[in-house]
Amino acid sequence: MGEERDSPEPSQLKLGAPVGIVDGPVEQLRIVEALLFAAAEPLDEAALAERLPRGADLTSILMTLQAFYASRGVNLVRVAGKWAFRTAEDLSFLLHRETTEERKLSRAALETLAIVAYHQPVTRAEIEEIRGVTVAKGTIDLLLETGWLRIRGRRKVPGRPVTFGTTPAFLDHFGLDAIADLPGLDDLKAAGMLDGRLPPNFRVPVPNDDVGLRDDEEPDDGPELDFGLPPVPDQESR
């Protein structure tokens, strides 16, 4: 029986290594590296494992690659539960001139996005209750178009309003591995994003973006009912 070998240390990796047959762990590492470089989207571990021999230690391979690229111009990062190469944060300013300037979200859109992220699944009426102001349909449409929000289902209440949640694209854009990585109460206070005069019972919800429908949700299989009520005037300009 052959001697078992560990994955190579980052210091043992060399750029420009000749192509050819090399020992198992190094070849497996090169395969994962090539797959991640060639992928147009982040890859999950299941997709990577499919291309490796049975018994390959994918976790060790990813940790080795992550350590090797930690000080380079691109880093291996985990976003939304998947792996991808990203420009090192301290060098991102160099690429600004090469990227198309993104349209900035309005305050209403940012507030709506934050409410959905922390309170999902949430309906439009619930968003309005939290914000204390009407949410324009265009605001939610914009967030749906960006791919950061999705329609989860419908609430099991009269009118069956649509429920909204975040998407993997939301996690990817904001550099989050999981929705639980959103800042909590202490983090928000430290960043100066919350008023210091908060009520004693104020709390920040623990976000949960589980794809499964909750007990009070049902599949979105029909039109939303509005009972013929007139639309509420848009107040987002305030």
Image (cartoon, rainbow, N blue to C red):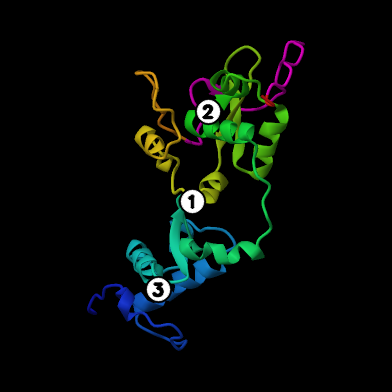
Residue appearing at x 43%, y 40% in the figure: 182
Contact flag, marks 2 and 1 (Cβ < 8 Å): no
Which residue occupies 50% across, 72% down? 34
The residue lying toward the viewer, choosing from 166 and 237, is 237
How far apart are labels 2 and 1 at the CA level?
A: 21 Å
Image quarter for residue 122?
Answer: top right
Residue 66's x, y, as percent? 38, 65
Kind of residue sitting beneath label 1: Gly
Which residue type does callout 3 highlight?
Answer: Gln
Instruction: Check disc 2 and report the residue beneath it.
Output: 121
Q: Is the magenta stretch mostly helix, strand or loop?
A: loop
Secondary structure under the numbered disc 1 in the rendered image: loop
Q: Residues within 10 Å of mark 3 (few under 14, many from 20)?
A: many
Q: Where is residue 215 drawn, in percent x and y?
A: 48, 22
Instruction: Indicate left or right for 218 with 135 as reference.
Output: left
Q: What stretch is highlighted in magenta?
A: 209-235
Q: Quadrant of residue 138?
A: top right
**Quadrant location of the N terminus in the rendered image:** bottom left
Kindly identify which residue carries mark 3.
Answer: 28
